[in-house]
């Protein structure tokens, strides 16, 4: 019983350290916002601006900086989470057009990406 408790304790500490260093990543698909959202309020009451490096996520806290890497070309961009997306959405992140340009998937419309929480 004591060994099980020690294992759980050590495993929990390891997971927490990985989360705090951004070592745990989420992988899935990213899309970019339509121009129709330009100038509208985001979920945290900012005015959405396609020229800024921002994004929407289902759960990541507002203000968190996230490194998004396009797994098809290895290009990366750092965005700030300032909006929410529907929990049933199959994509893992919605990016501003500026961020999508940095990742070079505007024409494709969608890209397979990994997310790494920075802070």
Image (cartoon, helix red, strand yellow):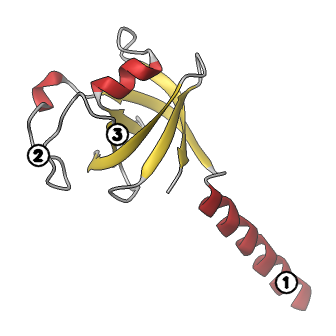
Q: Earlier in the sequence, mark 2 or mark 1?
A: 1
Give the SS element for disc 2: loop
* Position of 41 relative to 14 (above/below): above
- Circle 2 crowding by C-alpha within 10 Å: few under 14, some 14–19, many from 20: some
Q: Earlier in the sequence, mark 3 or mark 1?
A: 1
Nearer to us: label 3 or label 2: 2
* Position of 56 relative to 95 (above/below): below
Give the SS element for disc 1: helix
Residue 66 location (% of width, % of height): 47, 45
Where is the N terminus found, in terms of image quarters? bottom right
Residue at 13% x, 32% y: name it: 37
Residue at 69% x, 66% y: name it: 17
Q: Is residue 101 left or right of residue 37?
A: right
Q: Is residue 115 left or right of residue 9?
A: left
Residue 14's image quarter? bottom right
Residue 89's image quarter? top left
Give the SS element for disc 3: loop
Residue 32 location (% of width, % of height): 31, 26
User: Which residue was labeled with disc 2?
Assistant: 41
Determine the CA span between mark 2 and mark 1. Answer: 48 Å
Q: Which mark is residue 6?
A: 1
Nearer to us: label 2 or label 1: 2
Residue 10 location (% of width, % of height): 80, 76
- Circle 3 crowding by C-alpha within 10 Å: few under 14, some 14–19, many from 20: few
Q: Is residue 66 left or right of residue 72?
A: left
Image label count = 3
The reply to whether discs 2 and 1 touch (Cβ–Cβ < 8 Å) is no
């Amino acid at each position: 019983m004591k060994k099980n408790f020690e294992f759980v304790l050590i495993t929990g500490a390891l997971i927490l350290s990985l989360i705090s260093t951004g070592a745990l990543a989420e992988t899935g698909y990213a899309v970019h916002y339509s121009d129709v959202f330009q100038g509208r309020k985001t979920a945290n009451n900012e005015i959405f601006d396609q020229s800024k490096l921002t994004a929407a996520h289902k759960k990541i806290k507002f203000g968190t900086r996230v490194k998004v890497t396009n797994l098809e070309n290895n290009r990366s961009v750092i965005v700030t989470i300032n909006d929410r997306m529907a929990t049933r959405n199959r994509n893992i992140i919605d990016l501003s057009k500026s961020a999508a340009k940095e990742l070079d998937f505007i024409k494709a419309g969608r890209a397979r990406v990994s997310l790494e929480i920075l802070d």
